[in-house]
Amino acid sequence: MDVDMIFKIAAIGIIVAVLNQLLIRSGREEQAMMTTLAGLIVVLSMLITQISGLFESIKSLFGL
Amino acid sequence: MNIVSLCAVAVLTSILVLSLRRHNAEISFLSAAAGCVLILISVLVNMSSLYDTLRDILSASGIKLSYITILLKALGICFLTEFACDMCIDAGQRALAGNISLAGRLMIVLSAIPLYKEIIDTVLSLTGGSG
């Protein structure tokens, strides 16, 4: 894992926020919500592997 | 990663989270979580050599290996529950945080039960009780 990960997540957040605003302005609330949800799921799936790596390393290090 | 870059990562992540919170609160929280995981992983990678040294010192002092294992297991439980507790507090879930911290304490007590048994056996053998 690298610092790039944090920047990547922040970039996804900015892109999703811009898309959300655009879609709401053009009157497509459902699609805006779907975009937000998709961004959230993408970031979550990126983060889940990292968190599981952290838990695995703690488990192997401390013999849990 | 040295301490300077760790501090830089922490400050930078907080700035990112602050600037993102207004537009996208969920992803700003996830970004903070990514920062936490990054810092904790890089610290733990450095800690593995410290861990080996600690284990060598403790086993050289003549303490039983099972006791050392229990001690280090308690340390690991502390790390895990602290991380989960802080994440829950950040997400605004104080009840979950309190519960997970209570669960961590109980798990530590549970894994230390063999030590209590040992103490009770020693006391009983000293006082001559038959148990």
Image (spheres, coloured by chain):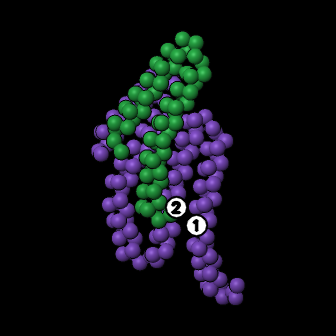
Chain colours: A green, B purple
Whether residue B72 is visible:
no
Chain letter of the residue carrying label 2: B
Residue depicted at 52% across the width and 36% down the height: A41
The picture places residue B106, in percent across and down from the top left corner, at 63, 59
Report helix, strand or loop for mark 1.
Answer: helix
Is residue B38 something one can see in this rendering? yes
Which residue is disc 1 drawn over? B111
Tell me, yes or no, whether the two marked residues, 1 and 2, touch with CB atoms within 8 Å.
Answer: yes
The numbered disc on residue B74 is: 2
- For the residue pair A33 and A56, the one nearer the viewer reads as A33
**Where residue B40 sits: x, y (%)?**
41, 47
As measured in the structure, the alpha-carbon distance from the residue carrying label 1 to the one carrying label 2 is 8 Å
On-image quarter of the C terminus of chain B:
bottom right
Nearer the observer, A18 or B24: A18
Marks 1 and 2 share the same chain:
yes
Earlier in the chain: of badge 1 and badge 2, it is 2
Q: Secondary structure at mark 2?
A: helix
User: Where is residue B88 drawn, in percent x and y?
Assistant: 58, 41
Out of B69 and B45, give the one closest to the viewer: B45
**Which of the 4 image quarters holds residue B111?**
bottom right
Amino acid identity at mark 2: Ala
Residue B47, horizontal then vertical, whole percent: 36, 56
Q: Residue at x 53, y 57 (%)?
A: B77
In the rendered view, tell whether residue B76 sits above or below residue A32. below
Residue A6 relative to residue B77: left or right? left
Side of A48 relative to B93 (left or right): left
**Disc 1 sits on a residue from what chain?**
B
**Amino acid type, mark 1:** Ser
Q: Residue at x 56, y 22 (%)?
A: A31
Relative to B32, is A52 above or below? below
